[in-house]
Image: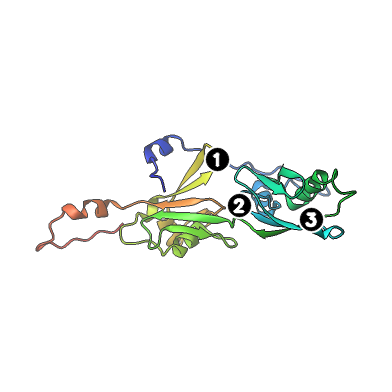
Amino acid sequence: MRELNFVTLTAALLFTCGSSPAAQDHGAAPAAVSADVQHRDARYRLSASDVVALTFPLTPEFDQTINIEPDGFASLAGVGEIRLGGLTLDESVAAVRTAYANVLHDPIVTIELKDFNKPYFIVSGEVGKPGKYDLRGDTRATEAIAIAGGFNEASKHSQVLLFRKVNGDWYEVMPLDLKRILQGHNVDEDPEIRPGDMLYVPQNTFSKIKKFIPTSGIGTYYQP
């Protein structure tokens, strides 16, 4: 993984703030669904390296399994390439039917997702097992650290950084005091991990200077 330039990232911090929902009168229409709920409930969209199976019940000779290429296109037998990346399965069915309209009369097709990019998160820095992990169900930052082997003796619990991609060029960087959360304080500030998030656990000050401290006949005590 490319080394992160924390000075640059810190200078480019994006601070977000929530807006309070509008008050509702009795009998009024429900408030708009929050962005977090929309994010969780959004239909899956095809992306690069996904594998889908096309089944034509009336013309099985066209049945095929295809891969979504890095550019979002897929090659279909008899009609060539069409873009499926970014489409839901329902939208993909419509696109495939349109593509085969000049080959088959009123084609009927079903699409099944056979393999897909599983949601993941990354934990790096001073943890037991830094790496990339599958995101399965609701996972909080403290749980993600535990999955990655927990903090090690060199970790700075109180200054963990959560990197969250905003778009292709920007990351939102959120500092987390997981030390206080693990002590039972501000537990509501333990954020839910989203697909693609990265947690970075920095090294504590004592670990940085430890190699310069003579150990012969000297006792040391440090609480990170």
User: Quadrant of residue 157 in the image?
Assistant: bottom left
Does the CB distance between marks 1 and 2 fall below 8 Å?
Answer: no
Per the image, the residue denoted by label 2 is 49
Looking at the image, what colour scheme do you see?
A: rainbow
**Badge 1: how crowded within 10 Å, few (<14), some, or many (20+)?**
few
Q: CA distance from mark 3 to mark 2?
A: 21 Å
Which residue is located at x 32 percent, y 52 percent?
Answer: 203
Please name the residue shown 45% across and 64% down the image.
146
**Of tags 1 and 2, which is closer to the observer?**
2
Q: Amino acid at mark 1?
A: Thr
Residue 144 is situated, as x and y percent measured from the top left of the image, at 48, 60
Query: Residue flagged by tag 2: what amino acid is it?
Result: Ser
Front residue of 156/83: it is 83
Looking at the image, tell me whether mark 1 or mark 2 is earlier in sequence order.
Answer: 1
Looking at the rendering, in which quadrant would you find the C terminus? Answer: bottom left
In front here: 67 or 144? 67
